[in-house]
Amino acid sequence: MAITSIMIVGVGGQGTLLASKILGNVAVSQGYDVKLSEVHGMAQRGGSVVTYVRYGDKVYSPIIAPAGADIVLAFEELEASRWANFCKKDGTLIVNTQRIDPMPVVTGAKNYPLKTMNELVEKQIKLIPVDALALAKQAGTVKAVNVVLIGVLAKSSNIPKEVWIESIKNTVPERFLEMNMKAFELGYNV
Amino acid sequence: MKEIMLGNEGVARGVFEAGATVVASYPGTPSTEITETIAKHNEIYSEWAPNEKVAMEVVIGASIAGARSFTAMKHVGLNVCADPLFTVSYTGINGGLVIAVADDPGMHSSQNEQDSRHYAMSAKIPMLEPSDSQEAKDFTKLAYELSEKYDVPFMLRLHTRVSHSRSLVDVGERTEVPLKEYKKDINKYVMMPGMARKRHVVVEERQAALQELAEQTELNYIEMNDTKIGIICSGICYQYAKEALPNASFLKLGMIYPLPAKKIAEFAKKVDKLYVIEELDPFIETFVKAQGIEVTGKDLFSVMGEYSVEMIAKAISGTNIETLDVKFEEELPPRPPVLCPGCPHRGLFYVLKKLKLTVTGDIGCYTLGALSPLDSIDACVCMGASIGMSLGMEKARGKDYARKLVAVIGDSTFIHSGITGLIDVVYNKGTSTVIILDNSITGMTGHQHNPSTGFTIKNEPTKQVDLVQLCKAIGVERVRVVDPFDVVETEKVIKEEVAADEPSVIIAQRPCALLKSVRYTGKVTVNQDKCTKCKMCMRIGCPAIAWKDGKIMIDHTQCNGCGLCLNVCKFGAMEKVGE
Ligand SMILES: Cc1ncc(C[n+]2csc(CCOP(=O)(O)OP(=O)(O)O)c2C)c(N)n1
């Protein structure tokens, strides 16, 4: 099988690492060769965070370069714009439309760009906008933003739904399972 | 059984399976998880040492005593322990000794981009370089056998993309290795000129043997394919190049010092055009050229930053990948890292900026105090440098200048290499002020204990360095302790100590907000009736406080109720709710 390259981007503290872990486990369970790459240290302190997941018969590079991702899963809108050029020409950009102001915007030195999503649509890029925060609330907890987005990703991936559900069952504690399954379904059906 | 693990976990697994029993390290991204993972094994003694030099000395001692031992560090850590490194090359080892060093091309979390391969060459210590997690484990285990066979420590060169990438690893069993016999042997272990001269002969003989090993070892292998293009590479660049040039022939080097001259010549003969693909310095390329072999390397590739599959494909095959047109009309603001909500350092930097002091800085989370809106650090070079630099500034510009000069240094960094700087201040009659930011943990690298926290790597209680007593014992008579969230008191104390015509230390004490023991409650809201929109609260640079639609607003997903803004607002407009 050709290699599938998925990039997960967001803001430090948003839980992108967990999403890449679940995705990695899903790929391993399918018998694929898998490589994941993460950023630790300085880059985590509220900065822009990127993780790469690649799977297929044989994976060499653990990282993805511009125009190399089949899917870019963005946990935040500005980060989606920042990393959009990592999407392949026919790739998919999944965007949680949540906005988190970076420090230069907080201090008023810069403005948060408001029109970039429209520009991406105009350029006919395959874009899936998701209000993951609202869907997570609907599922019962704002903390499930993560799982909502995994639901969206599952739908866009080439791995069967049951495998994803199994992996979530193995990762989240029993008492949160119902809420998380609801979040996953909401994401899957976007 | 195959498990998916970090390259760092692979190294840790290799150390475990090889039967090592003593491990000492100082944390440093991207190497930290190696020692953290090892610490979970009770079969191995492990510790966080105060710095890399001490760590290295501990494992040298353990090796002489007959144990398989190990230390890991980031690239700049190797500078700190370069002194023992160069001479352990002369003494050789008894129990196998492996030294892992993680380079950080692209500087994801480092202050420079140095290439640690030069150390292997100058210290005459062999070096292996894995390219994924499986090799990380296998090379580590093999390094122990080779170390004992050749009576030399082996270095393992890692890379951010190997250390922090996960891939599949075949997990094996641990082999218990008995301690080797220890025999007193001053000709081998006491390096004075008379003995060292003899040991240098041994080193040079060993070099010849290692050269032969480089030629024979299966770590260096040729993969013949199309003979038009031949690539010499190692580590992560092998992974990039294999994907970029699937049809090319490869000489993959698992052992990068010493380099195999004959094998390189043999490979060069088999291919039409020879390339070396290596990040950072032209280490392999220079060697190949010195053999009189024509090769292309840095003519095509940068000595700075990281490479990628696409970059290599473009440079060598001229393949251009079609990219999306994603230029936006609006500017995309950067997202620099920031001090976390509730970070104790924030209060201190707010005061330092207010007082317009010159601040020599150091390395840790608090280096972020250099960025806007805190803007309060003037210089930052390496761990421990803040104190020496402040003394140097005072000596250059005079005592009056010291009246507006402070050094800031974290607790872990102070223990690492700040103490000697402080001794210099006292001994050489400096008068500047040192502020120790004591957040009760080594924060930057992800919460490791250090001698000032009172706990070991295994979370066992131990003696705690008393920073006040320590500074007094050195000869600092003015030692004050403040809470950096009490900005009024902190300002007063800093003013007094900076004015004093003698050395002083201020310990700014408040634990890291991410520690489990720290429980702030409630959230802050702005009473808009009381808010005068003076924006004083924005000067603390809290990510939860923003200016929106002409008002100060608090983002409740970020606010953790630490309450610093309550202490900064002069109009009582910040109110705590939900406590
Ligand atoms: C020689 C060297 N070793 C290790 C590191 C990695 N490192 C950077 S900051 C730091 C520790 C910072 O801890 P502390 O001084 O307590 O400050 P905090 O981050 O907690 O504010 C370490 C280990 C380094 N940069 N240089």
Image: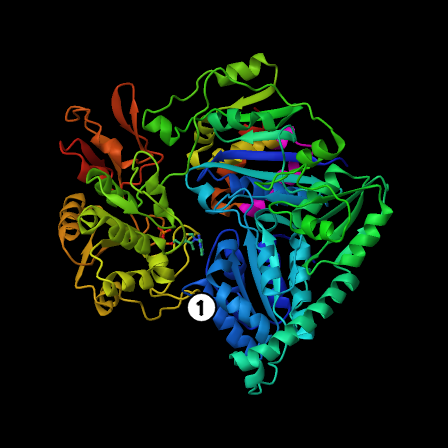
Identify which residue is drawn at 60% across, 45% down. B280
Residue A165 is inside the magenta segment: yes
- Give the structural element (helix, strand or loop) at label 1: helix
Q: Is residue B293 visible?
A: yes
Q: Position of residue B462 (x, y in %)?
A: 35, 70
Q: Residue beneath label 1, please?
A: B54
Q: Nearer the viewer, residue B21 or B268?
A: B268
Q: Position of residue B389 (x, y in %)?
A: 32, 52
Q: Quadrant of the N terminus of chain B?
A: bottom right
Subunit under mark 1? B
Residue B576 is inside the magenta segment: no
Q: Position of residue B344 (x, y in %)?
A: 28, 47
- In the rendered view, tell whether residue B93 sits above or below residue A103: below
Side of B478 where A184 appears, left or right = right
| Range of magenta residues | A154-171
Identify which residue is drawn at 78% across, 47% down. B250
